[in-house]
Structure formats: C-alpha cells, structure tokens
Image (cartoon, rainbow, N blue to C red):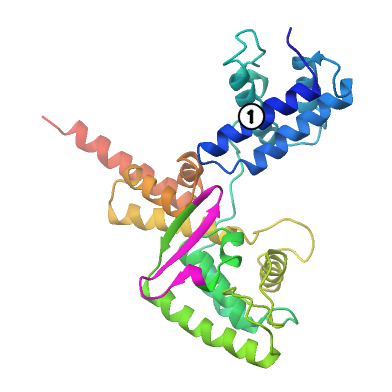
Amino acid sequence: MTLISAAVLAEDIAHFVAFKRAMGNSYRRSELTLKSFQRAVEQRGGLHAKVPFDAVLHEWLSRSPHRQPVTVGLEFGVIRQLCLYRRRWDPDSFVPEPDWAPIKESTFLPYIFTYEEVVHLIAAARAHDARNLAGDMLRMLLLILYCTGLRLGEAVRLQLTDVDLEQMCFIIRESKGKTRIVPFLDDLARELSDCLLLRRRILETTAMVDPGALLLRNSGQALSVVTASEAIRRLLRREGLKPARGRKGPRPYEFRHAFAVHRLTAWYHEGVDIHARLPWLSAYMGHVDLLGTQVYLRATPELMRLASQRFARHWHHLDNMP
C-alpha cells in the first residue's frame, strides 16, 4: 500500500507539472485536475498525515454519480501519468491499473450542419439585431469558424497582429499549448478586408481606443466568448435549428465540426486517401493527436455511406484480380 500526504503530493505535482511544461505542454487544465486530487488528500488527512493513495483516488474519482464516464476517464489518465512519474524514483509507488477508468474516448456525436444550413445561417446573421453585436460582425465570426474550423475561443481572441491578409493566414497563439498557422483562401481574405472597414467605423462611432482585437462589439470593446456564444445561440433558435429553451440542438461549436466533416466528405468525393490526409486536417485544426480528428469519420451517414462504397469497390477489385 502506498501512503501519501498532501504536502508530499503538492511537491510531486509541482515537479511533474514543471516537467510537462518543459516538454512544451501548457498543462493548465491537467494541473487543475491534479490540484483537485491534492485537495481530496488534504481533506482526508490534513497537510502532513499520510493516507492510502489508492483509497483516496477511488473516492475522488467516484465523488459524484452524475459525472460523465469520459470525464472520469480523462481525470484518471492525468493522475495515472503522475503515478508513473512518481514510480521513476520509487519503484514501489502505487500506479492504478488502466481498467479503473476504461473509457478514454467520448461517444458523443456532434450535430453536423448541412452545407445548406451553413449558407442559410451565414446569410441570416446579417439580420442579427442586438445591442452588443452587429449582424455583419456576427456574420464575419461565422465565416471564420466555418472556413477555417477554428475553435470559438480561438476566433474570438484573434488580434489584428494575428491576421496576415497578404499571406492569407491566421496565427493562432498558444491554443491547447501550441501556436499554429492557419491558412485561408482569398474569398475569406476579401471578407476580412470588409471586416476591417466595419471595425474602423465602430471605433470612429464610439470614439473608443482600439483594443487590437479583430472582432468588436458595438461598444468598440473586444468581443468576448460569452457574447459570441450567446449571439450564435440566439441565431440558431431564431432560425429553428435549436429549441427556444434548453441545451438541446446544435451549439456554437458545431461550425468547427461542420468544417471538418465537409472537408472529409469533399476528399472522399475527390477519391483521395482519407487516412493519409487525416494528419493534415489534425494539424490544421490544432488537435493534440489523430484521435480528435478520427471521430469525424463516423460523424454523418453520408461519410459512412461513402466509406462503405469505397470499401465495396476495393473488395470488388480484389475479387476480380487474377
């Protein structure tokens, strides 16, 4: 049995987080998970009293019956990494078996907008009438989300210095621990040029000091994720794609999903090797690994149908080989 005190655990966590960050990971969310477990240890035995590592871990993982299994699995994965790190200098240190929390991947399937729905929503965004956000600014946000697959927070946090219209690319800084370059086509570049004119008019009207953000509220302040999310939800409800109340229906995040699925579908129609292209899409979207991208291969019936048809053609070809 491995015994641990909150004080010793705090030191181990500090060393482990420093190690992860030295490897290039921001590790912010995982650090919060580790600190939550540290508090559980401290609540069980105080700061210096030693308590059974495995017993506290089991209690902490099962602290609420309403948490999603995938959430438990992700938290467990972080703690297990810490345990493996501790075993480097203590061969007898406790490391939980993987089957403590076997679910590592979410079974959630996103709502995928059709191409027609995307076109309709982008057009309908012009009619958005709210005190906080102009319709044309909301439309620009949707264009960025759909044309590049950026996360909502990444799009909202874009600064003017992150936009290169000559090279036609965004610089996405320190998102999920990485900085990446996201190219776009000339049609989006033209829309962005119009956006720059719009934001200039907003600043002239409000006499606000330029905050440097690409997307602005009507007040001249930088657009926030909360304001952007609420504006998109209102649009989805107004256009009948989301119920008037509740969390059911598509979310603001679905434009990113639509980008990925529509790109994969286009590649299927073009006859390219999807699995060879997945690393491209994964890097472009800023996924940590291919698992985050592969989920889109089963996201829509059309993709499944295209994949089945391609497999059938391949099998027929093998059957007819001499």
Indicate the position of residue 313 as horizontal and vertical percent values: 27, 42
- The answer to whether 36 appears left or right of 185 in the picture is right
Q: Quadrant of the N terminus?
A: top right
User: Residue 212: x and y, percent?
Assistant: 59, 75
Q: Nearer the viewer, residue 186 or 256?
A: 186
Q: Is residue 164 magenta?
A: yes
Q: Which stretch is magenta? A: 161-178
Horizontal side of residue 306 vs 46, given as left or right: left
| Residue nearest the viewer, comparing 240 with 51 | 51
Image quarter of residue 52: top right
Residue 73 lies in the magenta-colored region: no
Q: Is residue 9 left or right of residue 77?
A: right
Q: According to the image, label 1 marks what residue?
A: 15
Q: Residues within 10 Å of mark 1 (few under 14, many from 20)?
A: some
Horizontal side of residue 235 vs 117, given as left or right = right
Residue 72 location in percent, x, y? 70, 32
Count the labels in the image.
1
Q: Residue furthest bottom?
A: 205
